[in-house]
Amino acid sequence: MLIQTLLYVGGGGALGFGYYKLVGCRSRACLLTSNPWVATIYGAVMGFMLGNGPR
């Protein structure tokens, strides 16, 4: 169970960082995509929520 959660969190963080690198906001006006730390943490939180959803 812990391994699955860590995989979801790591994958979400990687996808969040990938979104920042590939799509990101160059004008710094977008809160989520203008900062790599925020995008990565947001992706990790989304991965955690997806991995630990209702059962």
Image (cartoon, helix red, strand yellow):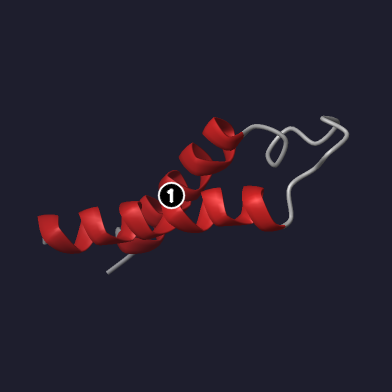
**Total numbered badges shown on the rendered structure:** 1
Q: Which residue is mark 1?
A: 13
Identify the residue at image location x=64%, y=50%: 21
Q: Residues within 10 Å of mark 1 (few under 14, many from 20)?
A: many
Report which quarter residue 51 is drawn in: bottom left
Indicate left or right for 10 with 30 as reference: left
Q: Which of the image's four quarters has the C terminus?
A: bottom left
Work out whether 36 lies above or below 19: above
Q: Which of the image's four quarters has the N terminus?
A: bottom left
For badge 1, the amino acid type reads: Gly
Report which quarter residue 30 is drawn in: top right
Indicate left or right for 41 with 31 as reference: left
Identify the residue at image location x=33%, y=52%: 9
Work out whether 7 lies above or below 39: below
* Numbered disc 1: secondary structure: helix
Q: Nearer the viewer, residue 20 or 31?
A: 20
Residue 32 x, y percent position in the rendering: 68, 38
Work out whether 39 lies above or below 7: above
Work out whether 33 lies above or below 52: above
Residue 23 x, y percent position in the rendering: 74, 56
Q: Nearer the viewer, residue 25 or 42?
A: 25
Outermost residue toward the bottom?
55
Identify the residue at image location x=50%, y=49%: 43
Indicate left or right for 13 with 4 as reference: right
